[in-house]
């Protein structure tokens, strides 16, 4: 079990080392905050607040980074990635992204659309016939499906990107259907088998009717395999990660580098601090497999994810390499949801009082809406999402800024990491 005292001692020992590691990140151009219009005192407070998450025993370790106008102005690590083994958190430590995988995989898949090999308004059945044959739940009685009907209009690729295809996650389907998340995304399986298993169930809603979080990205991953003829891990490297230097983003660690992956922590039941817990498996993480969950299987680093976000901010290119057309980036960041489809997305969709408010959905990414209630600072049209084990990011085209923070934590008050990042960055911009 990790105690508060252990974590605080680790921070004192490794805080200076974390700064030194940050200075070694030479491949991203660097600048002082003041050189790109950021208030230094506010950035210092952001740094202190990130460190305090560890000092106060709320996280075992944290890494965060900020870029503005294409320049890296902060990249720091605090705490431990593995307390029991005495391994410090480093700026190149790796993290399970879970849902933060989605924007990355979507960008890679959209390269097929840019090349004319994939039409966003194509029926999904063109690529995955069994998905086109899925029925839709029509009536239920006491939690039991009593009648299904055909898809009134065929599910489209765009609806998969917009998360309005009628799919959810296993917990969303009626329990009487017996769907299991682990069966659909079995780690000893692959995306082709995932589609076969998923297609045996009825859709929850008619395609286009409602935004629901679910298996959409994994279905898109299989479409990419069918169109490209490549396994999705190879496709992702060839189309995106290898091209823009995301060398630490993959479905598992490199051989011999397993120790770079941070452990997951949760509050101890007796209130004595944090304790390590097993990660929820969405990938094999430290060894190769054949399951490439495009919706939640990636691991990455803060610096890699900053590179990805900067590519989006640049309109689809980084370091002279074009990944996507500017028009595709614009479509990715345009809210696609109507009021009838839900209007706003809910990060914690099973809670009534969600902290995450005021965002719609583009092509597999959250989009900040104008003229609505927001619970954290930002700019209209900023893009964001996060991951189950406490990773988060946002990019703000209006301010030409992006920021990423990563921990590995499952427990209450997970949103503290996002609030700390957002409030600190926007204070440095002179916005609250």
Image: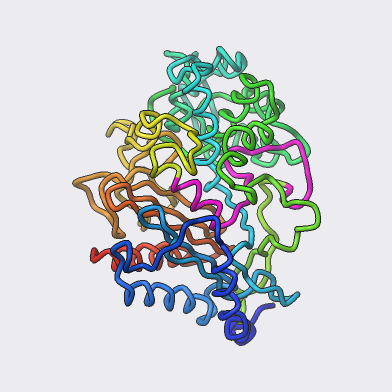
Residue 208, quarter of picture: top left
Q: At x 35% / y 54%, what residue is drawn?
A: 69
**Can you say whether 257 is above or below 34 in the image?**
above
Residue 250, quarter of picture: top right
Say which of 382 and 272 sits in front: 382
**Total numbered circles:** 0
Q: At x 57% / y 37%, what residue is drawn?
A: 240
Residue 221, quarter of picture: top right
The reply, left or right, for residue 11 in relation to residue 429 is right
Say which of 290 and 43 sits in front: 43
The colour mode here is rainbow
Q: Residue furthest left?
A: 371
Quarter the C terminus occupies: bottom left
- What segment carries the magenta color? 284-310
Q: Position of residue 33 (x, y in %)?
A: 36, 67
The reply, left or right, for residue 174 in relation to residue 48 is right
Q: Position of residue 234 (x, y in %)?
A: 69, 33
The reply, left or right, for residue 352 in relation to residue 58 is left
Quarter the N terminus occupies: bottom right
Q: At x 44% / y 26%, what residue is drawn?
A: 159
Is 393 part of what is drawn in magenta? no
**Can you say whether 386 is above or below 196 in the image?**
below
Is 293 part of what is drawn in magenta? yes
Q: Position of residue 277 (x, y in %)?
A: 68, 65
**Can you say whether 353 is above or below 274 in the image?**
above
Q: Position of residue 238 (x, y in %)?
A: 63, 33
């Amino acid at each position: 079990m990790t105690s508060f005292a252990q974590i605080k001692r680790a921070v004192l020992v490794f805080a200076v080392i974390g700064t030194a590691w940050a200075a070694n990140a030479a491949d991203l151009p660097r600048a002082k905050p003041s050189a790109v219009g950021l208030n230094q005192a506010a950035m210092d407070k952001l740094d202190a607040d990130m460190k305090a998450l560890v000092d106060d025993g709320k996280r075992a370790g944290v890494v965060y980074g900020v870029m503005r106008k294409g320049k890296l102005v902060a990249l720091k690590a605090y705490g431990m990635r593995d307390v029991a083994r005495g391994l410090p958190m480093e700026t190149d430590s790796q993290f399970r992204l879970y849902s933060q995988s989605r924007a990355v995989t979507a960008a890679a898949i959209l390269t097929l659309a840019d090349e004319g090999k994939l039409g966003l308004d194509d029926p999904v059945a063109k690529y995955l016939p069994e998905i086109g044959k899925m029925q839709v739940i029509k009536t239920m009685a006491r939690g039991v499906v009593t009648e299904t009907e055909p898809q009134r209009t065929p599910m489209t690729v765009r609806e998969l990107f917009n998360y309005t295809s009628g799919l959810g996650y296993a917990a969303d389907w009626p329990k009487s259907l017996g769907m299991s998340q682990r069966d659909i995304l079995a780690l000893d399986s692959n995306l082709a088998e995932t589609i076969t298993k998923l297609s045996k169930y009825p859709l929850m809603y008619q395609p286009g009717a409602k935004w629901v979080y679910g298996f959409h990205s994994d279905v898109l991953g299989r479409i990419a395999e069918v169109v490209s003829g490549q396994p999705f891990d190879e496709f992702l490297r060839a189309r995106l990660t290898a091209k823009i230097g995301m060398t630490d983003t993959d479905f598992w660690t490199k051989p011999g580098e397993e120790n770079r992956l941070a452990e997951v922590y949760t509050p101890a039941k007796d209130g004595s601090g944090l304790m390590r817990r097993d990660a929820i498996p969405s990938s094999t993480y430290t060894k190769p497999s054949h399951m490439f969950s495009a919706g939640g299987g990636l691991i990455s680093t803060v610096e890699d994810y900053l590179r990805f976000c900067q590519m989006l901010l640049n309109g689809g290119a980084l370091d002279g390499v074009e990944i996507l057309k500017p028009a595709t980036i614009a479509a990715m960041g345009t809210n696609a949801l109507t009021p009838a489809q839900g209007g706003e997305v809910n990060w914690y969709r099973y809670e009534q009082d969600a902290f995450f408010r005021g965002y719609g959905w583009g092509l597999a990414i959250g989009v900040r809406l104008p003229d609505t209630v927001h619970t954290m600072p930002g700019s209209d049209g900023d893009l964001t999402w996060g991951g189950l084990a406490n990773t988060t990011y946002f990019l703000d085209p209006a301010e030409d800024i992006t920021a990423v923070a990563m921990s590995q934590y499952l427990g209450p008050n997970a949103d503290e990491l996002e609030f700390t990042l957002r409030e600190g960055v926007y204070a440095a911009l002179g916005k609250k």
